[in-house]
Image (cartoon, rainbow, N blue to C red):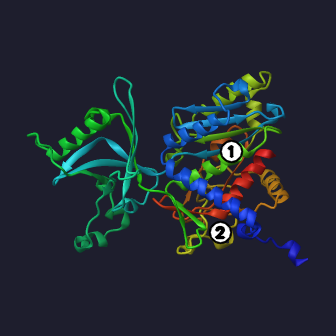
Amino acid sequence: MEETLKYKPTSCWERYGSEAERGAMDSLAEEFLEFLTRCKTERETVAWVAEQAAALGFSDAPGQGRVVQAFRSKAVLLARRGTLPLSDGVRLITAHVDTPHLDLKQHPLHEECQVALMKTHYYGGIKKYQWLARPLALHGTVVTMDGRAVFICIGEHGDDPVFTVLDLLPHLARKQREETVEKAFVGEKLNLAFGHEPATTDEEAKVRQRVLELLYERYAIREEDLFSAELQVVPAGRARFVGLDRSLLGGYGQDDRLCVFAAFKAFMDAPAEGHAQVLLLCDREEVGADGATGSKSRFMENALADIVEAWEPEAKPRRVLSRTKAVSADVHCPMDPDYQDVHDKHNASLLGFGPVFSKFTGHGGKYGASEADCEYVAWFRALLAAEGIPWQMAEMGKVDEGGGGTVAKDLAVYGMEVIDFGPGVLSMHSPFEISSKADLYATVKAYTAFYRS
Ligand code: MN
Ligand code: MN
């Protein structure tokens, strides 16, 4: 009796312990690390998804029944027609393709003390000190006035140079040590060391001039082209296995590319039957989801309306939306071994015990978020129980400790049933985030079960 009443969490390592499952887990992890290494910006992620989808027969013509529609290179929607009518709603998973990083400012280039520097403006919630004194890469797009797009990626390949934000030596950091972290590390000091060799011309700022010469030689761009550019500074280097047992996955941008990858795999694994399936990948989640490519934009609504018109003109888009079941696929914060005190351990998740439901997000008295209905959560539990997929139910941290929001509320406004559901990530928002190989495997299983439902 005691055994049947008590809830017992299931470890993904135990659930997927067979040799075959572990082999599948390893190859999935390797594939994910490749993806994470290659996709470090929203544009790179959307291009990767669009390219993979096109290779699998998806096109931007809704008539085909398999649709991929990219929007402004920074958001993308995939849809597959099922056997049930659209008016029964669709199965939708959404994740975000943007990650915290440093953007170059519009007037980035200057010179101080014989060093050329690029000024930056950080994007999203970063701990500024984590970006100092480490190899950084520059990724992005520069467009010239004649419409030519120049794609830049420096710091990732072969003997590419990297860049770095300089840090103060400890010998002279006495005053800094007495400051609060907030005051000790300020945005205006996040400048990227970009050059040192002076130009041979008689210009005043010779090092700065030399950088402009090199940019022109290599990319045929001038200083003014930087004003309109989208250039992002991200941690340089590959995503890696972490731990002697290679059980952890380490790399930049897992919030939320861990979910992007898991949802994409699940979407591609799902059969063209049952409900129509949709994968929506949005930008700008880390800064409030506003703007043309964020989840608050009309992009999804418009793209779905076009699909409804092509597949089932008699169906009403608003009906399709309100009957949809959705997952806001975003990463969760499991118990941090070194900072356990910020969690309510009775309502926290653990790495390795499967993807995590957040019935609601927000902060304080549940401000700024939607909350999933008990009916929907129970439906979802039954779905996962049928396949014995491990999962967890948790809150983000102690009630008054802080909080955070996701895009779930942007879907809830349409009347969809929606819940946050994603794997745990340690060192979240840092340049080297950590996830569990076993959680990734279970998450793909869970998202696949959802698409098949
Ligand atoms: Mn996120
Ligand atoms: Mn985030």
Residue closest to the far front: 158
For mark 1, give the secondary structure. Answer: strand
Q: Quadrant of the N terminus?
A: bottom right
Placement of 116 over or under 293, stated as above or below: below
Q: Earlier in the sequence, mark 1 or mark 2?
A: 1
For the residue pair 429 and 367, the one nearer the viewer reads as 429
Measure the alpha-carbon separation of dots 1 and 2.
23 Å
**Residue 215 drawn at (x, y percent):** 27, 39
Quarter of the figure with residue 411: top right
Image side of residue 176 versus residue 203, left or right: right
Residue lying at 80% horizontally and 35% vertically, measured from the top left: 82
Q: Is residue 355 visible?
A: no
Quarter of the figure with residue 129: bottom left
- The circle on residue 334 is none
**Residue 182 drawn at (x, y percent):** 37, 62
- The circle on residue 350 is 2
For the residue pair 79 and 32, the one nearer the viewer reads as 32
Residue lying at 68% horizontally and 33% vertically, measured from the top left: 57
Quarter of the figure with residue 217: top left
Residue lying at 67% horizontally and 48% vertically, measured from the top left: 265
Tally of numbered tags: 2
Placement of 8 over or under 113, stated as above or below: below
What type is the residue that disc 1 sits on?
Ile
**Residue 360 drawn at (x, y percent):** 67, 55
Count neighbours of disc 1 (C-alpha within 10 A) and say few if under 14, some if 14 to 19, many if 20 or more: many
For mark 2, give the secondary structure. Answer: loop
Residue closest to the far bottom: 2
The residue carrying mark 1 is: 93
Q: Is residue 344 visible?
A: yes
What type is the residue that disc 2 sits on?
Leu
